[in-house]
Image: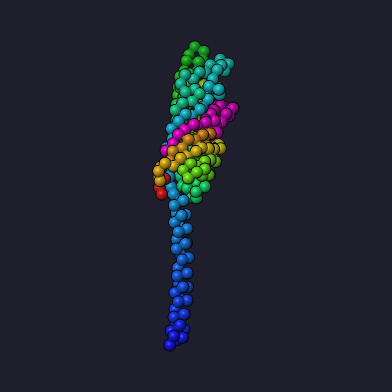
Amino acid sequence: MKSKSLLILAPAMLFAQAVLAGGSTPLQCTSTSNNVAKASHFYVAGVVGYAQSPWDEIVGGDHGAISISLPKNGAGGFTWGGSIGYQYQSWLGIELGAFNLPVVTMKITVPHSNISGDISTYIVYLAAKLSHPLTSHLTLFSKFGVGYQNLTADKVLDQGTEGIHSNSNFGPYFAAGLSYQFMRNLSVSLQFARAAGQSVHGADEDKYSTNPNFYTAGLQYSFK
């Protein structure tokens, strides 16, 4: 009887062991997929800081019979911006963002008259974001992409080829910085960014825009 019982129990024990062993594999896969889901998320961010946009170096001074001065924000000023992004993996993401540059006041002195007007500029960029964790909370990141700069100048600043004309251009954009995660969904950052401008001397008009540098601090909320 004992031998018959062993013969019956042995296959049952082997079957139970196989079921339990096979059941561990789906649990491991589920855990891995959860980790991937946590790494992938959308986020929104806002930044404030200083934009260095040296108009005084580009067009300031005397140009023949015309003299140009920049009484307001000629070298730069306060900037703000924001972004939305998708973190695909812990080290790779994509980001769409924008900066609003400080309004520059320009004064043009021509023979027998003075003209004053404003220049407004914004930048939109699309960039890949690469991240490298230094600690569990501190992350080093960089961004590489393309930026679109749009400049609007008051019509009174249009003084032929020597004036300032509204224009736009595409160019490279890059940034680098550090972020610190102090809560599950919140992090702060310090960032340096640079966008490309242009200096085109055309037959009918010149098109100018600066190569601005952005020094900003930001706050990010991650949807995870």
- Residue at 46 percent across and 80 percent down: it is 10
| Residue 200, magenta (yes or no) | yes
Q: Of helix, strand and loop, which mostly describes the magenta segment?
A: strand
Which residue in the rendered view is the most extreme toward the top? 112
Q: Which residues are magenta?
A: 195-219
Q: Is residue 199 above or below residue 183?
A: above
Closer to the camera, 34 or 66? Answer: 34
Q: Is residue 224 above or below residue 55?
A: below
Rendered location of residue 154, percent (x, y): 45, 25
Q: Is residue 10 above or below residue 35?
A: below
| Residue 193, magenta (yes or no) | no
Q: How is the image coloured?
A: rainbow
Which residue in the rendered view is the most extreme toward the front? 2
- Residue at 47 percent across and 33 percent down: it is 216
Closer to the camera, 102 or 30? Answer: 30
Rendered location of residue 138, percent (x, y): 48, 41
Q: Is residue 126 above or below residue 3?
A: above
Number of numbered labels in the structure image: 0
Closer to the camera, 204 or 108? Answer: 108
Rendered location of residue 54, percent (x, y): 53, 25
Q: Is residue 179 visible?
A: yes
- Residue at 49 percent across and 31 percent down: it is 215
Is 70 left or right of 223, judged from the image as shown? right
Q: Is residue 156 visible?
A: no
Rendered location of residue 103, percent (x, y): 45, 26
- Residue at 43 percent across and 32 percent down: it is 48
